[in-house]
Amino acid sequence: MIKIHISTKDGVPIFQQIVTQIKHMVASGRLAPGEIVPPIRVLAEQLLINPNTVARAYKELESEGIFISRQGSGTRVAEKGSTLDYAERLQVLTERVESLLVEADQLDFTVEDIIELIRQKNKLFYTSERGKNIND
Amino acid sequence: MIKIHISTKDGVPIFQQIVTQIKHMVASGRLAPGEIVPPIRVLAEQLLINPNTVARAYKELESEGIFISRQGSGTRVAEKGSTLDYAERLQVLTERVESLLVEADQLDFTVEDIIELIRQKNKLFYTSERGKNIND
DNA sequence: TAAATTGTATTAAGACAATAATACAATTGT
DNA sequence: ACAATTGTATTATTGTCTTAATACAATTTA
């Protein structure tokens, strides 16, 4: 069962949260190419949201080449998978890093504080949590 | 000059982004109690957004007791503004870092990639701090 | 005192998100 | 063949966010 966490607190549109989290699962291999994903109505029921909202997310994912949908048959992860090239992936990461730097500065932490924290977390990440579900 | 980073990509309402980042600056002491903050119209011009949007953020912050606004006089950080202690600030930063690590992993970047990127951005960050405003 | 500054308030419009209720099309399973 | 499943599409409604354009009130400044 696909685990998607919907947050209604941060103002991010629900369909966008679904798209982003599905992308991550595909990128990390948690959703393999060819693998079938839950029907729109099923996922909607699971997430307690309207089927139209899930449909919108699936439609977006298909338009990006990540999903392949067929009426009656269902929706699967495309064989080609995520089509992000290096520059695009770097762009995403860069934006995340910029946001982190601003926020850390606002919280009065230095860059070295951040880096130390990253190394700490990374140690834990690789020694105990690698391969497990870390989306919570 | 207050540094606020507005993202128009992730769907988070602009007024909410302002509220969150101001809160962090107050929590860390980067915005001190009694300190005056930019007039609504000035911040709006700086962020290239509508004054009403800034007004909404300020209104929200005042309703939470973080700001104190007076017509004609301006808006200041409340004397007994909510301040997070070190553990709480670290907790916020830790969550951000964890999110970044997960996302970077999904995007197939290593920790060293992240750190290198941080050092790059940090260099730009401080050089632009001295000179003029380089807003992405 | 008069002008400028600053916060407050209102109304309107457009765009978007989400829900709701259907209907239809293609495929699958019996 | 038939029913169930599944994706697709449409229309309507409600609510929120943002911009826009004003107007007004309180304070500061010249």
Image: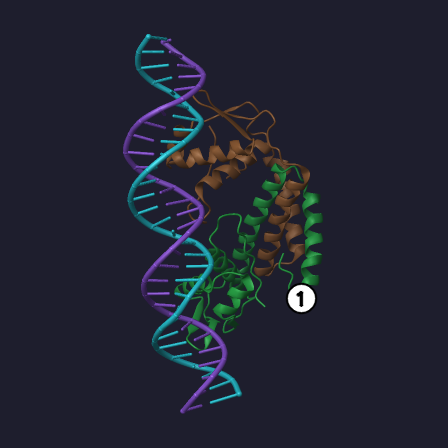
Chain colours: A brown, B green, C purple, D cyan
Q: Amino acid at mark 1?
A: Lys
Q: Is residue C4 above or below residue A107?
A: below
Q: Is residue A33 above or below residue B77?
A: above
Q: Is residue B125 left or right of residue A13?
A: right
* Residue A40 horizontal/vertical position (percent): 42, 29
The residue nearer to you, when weighing A38 against C15, is C15
* Residue B135 horizontal/vertical position (percent): 62, 59
* Residue C10 horizontal/vertical position (percent): 32, 65
Q: Tell me which residue sits at (54%, 61%) in the image.
A: B48
Q: Is residue A84 left or right of residue A134?
A: right
Q: Where the C terminus of chain B falls, by quadrant?
A: bottom right
> Picture quarter containing residue A6?
top left
The residue nearer to you, when weighing B54 against C13, is C13
Say few, some or many: other residues with alpha carbon within 10 Å of mark 1 (under 14 / 14 to 19 / 20 or more). Answer: few
Residue B44 visible? The answer is yes
According to the picture, the residue beneath numbered tag 1 turns out to be B132
Q: Tell me which residue sits at (52%, 33%) in the image.
A: A61
